[in-house]
Amino acid sequence: MISKIVESAADAVRDIPDGAAVMIGGFGTAGQPVELIDALLEQGASDLTIVNNNAGNGTTGLAALLAAGRVRKIICSFPRQVDSQIFDGLYRQGKLELELVPQGTLAERIRAGGAGIAGFFTPTAFGTTLAEGKETRHINGRDYVLEEALVADYALIKAHRGDRLGNLVYRKTARNFGPVMASAATVTIAQVGSVVDAGALDPEAVVTPGIFVERVVEVGGALPPTTEGQ
Amino acid sequence: MRGPLGRDDMAQRVAQDIAEGAYVNLGIGLPTKVANFLPPDREIILHTENGMLGMGPVAEGNQIDHDLINAGKIPVTELPGASYFHQADSFGMMRGGHLDICVLGAFQVSTSGDLANWHTGAPDAIPAVGGAMDLASGAKKVFVVMELFTRDGQCKLVQECTYPLTGIGCVNALYTDYAVFDLSADGVQVREIFGDNTLEQLEELTGLSLNRA
C-alpha cells in the first residue's frame, strides 16, 4: 500500500543535501511551510538555492534560514518588505546572490518546469532591465522575452489537508505557489494541517494530485470544520 | 506642489471610470483606496494577484484570517462568488488579457505611456518587482493614479522616464490631482482639468505641450 506519510518534519527533510535547490511556498507568511523550514534549519544543510516569492519576514521561517547563513542564492520577485531586515543586511554585505524575477514570470517558469516546457516567450519585462541579455522575439505584432523553466531538487509547501497518496487541498490565498512548486521539484514535501483518509477528499476538489507529492507530514493547526473550505 | 484634488478625490475619480461587470486589480497604496469609492450600483470583481477573485473589504476583528490576505499582505475578506487559484493561474489571467483594468501607482509616466514604478535605480536600493511588470503588460487597460508632481515640484509626467522602466507604452490613462490624461503612442491628451487651471497653465506647470481630448 502506498503511504507518503512521514512521522515528523525532521524525517521529511532529513536527506536534503548541501547545495540543493529548494522551492519554498508562500506569499509573505500565507502558505509558508514554517515547520518544514524550521526542520531544514535544524538539519543543517547549507549552500542552498532557495526559490520563494519573497525573501523572509521578521526573524523566523525563511528569514531564520537566511540569518543562519545556509543560503547561497535566492530566486524571488519581492525581497524588499517592511520586515525583510535579514535579507536586506545579507544582500548589502554581498553575502547572498539575488535573481530577481517578475512574480508572474516566476510562477510560469515554475509551472513550465513541472510541465516539461523548456522555456516560453512572455511580454512581461520586455524593454526593462530585467530582460537584459535575454533572447527576444517579435511575434504577431508584439515583443516577447524568452524565459527558461525553473525546477528544483526539493519543494517545501504548506497545504490544508492531504491523504496518504499525496492528494492536497489548500486554504484560501495560502494556496499561492504550492501547486506549481509541487509539480516542479524532484521531491515535494507537503506539510498539512491534517492528514485524512484516502477518499475523504472530494476527487473533484483535489487541487494537487498525489503524483506531484512524495512526502506528507501532519503538523496540526487545522481550523475548525465550520471555517474549512475544501 | 499639490493640485485641486486630494488623494480620496483622486481615488474616487478613478472609480467613476470602472464599469459594471469589470474585473479589476488594484495596486498597493493609493490604488487600493479606489475600492472605497466603487459605485455601489455596479458589480465589480476585484482580483488580488496572490490568488483570488471576489476580494471583499479589509478584514476586521474576528474576520482576520492569515490565510486570506491581499497583495499588500493585509488580511481581507471574501465576497459571495469568490474563487481561489494558484499563482500561475493568477498571472495567467493577467498576462492573458482577461483582466479589464489594473490601477497602479507610479514614480514616472511618459507621454507615450511608458511606466516606471518598481525601482528608483538608486545604487543602494534593494530591487523588488513583485507583480508590477506582469500587471503593466497584461491588463486590457492600465490606469495610473498619482500626484502630478513630486514633493519638490518635479513633474512625474515626462517626455522620457529617467527611472528604470516597468513597461513600455502600457499606460492608457493617468489620473492626477490636476487633470486626467489619455496616453497613447500618438502622445498625451488632456481629458479633464480639475479646479481653475487652464490648458495653458497646465502646459506651463508641466513643461509639456498638451492638447485637449
Image (cartoon, rainbow, N blue to C red):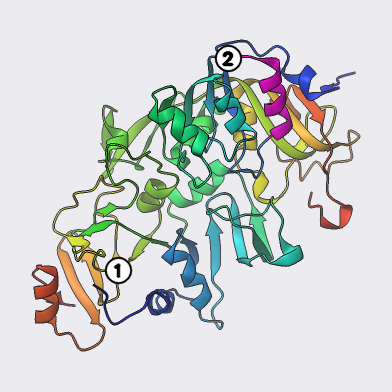
Rounded to the nearest angstrom, the CA distance separating label 2 from label 1 is 47 Å
Q: Please identify the quarter of the rendering in which residue A199 is found.
A: top right
The extreme bottom residue here reads B196
Q: Do the residues marked 2 and 1 share a common chain?
A: no
The residue range painted magenta reads: A33-45
Q: Residue at x 35, y 30 (%)?
A: A146
In front: B144, or B140? B144
The vertical placement of A44 against A206, above or below, is above
Quickly name the residue at label 2.
Answer: A46
At x 26%, y 31%, the residue is A132
How busy is the neighbourhood of tag 2: few (under 14 within 10 Å), some, or many (20 plus)?
Answer: many
Q: Amino acid at mark 1?
A: Glu
Q: Quadrant of residue B3?
A: bottom left
Q: Say if A170 sits above or below B115 in the image.
A: above
Label 2 lies in what chain?
A
Disc number at residue B147?
A: 1
**Type of the residue with mark 2:** Ser
Is residue A53 visible in the rendered structure shown here? Answer: yes
Q: Is residue B21 visible?
A: no
Q: Position of residue B136 (x, y in %)?
A: 36, 52
Horizontally, is A23 left or right of B7 in the view?
right
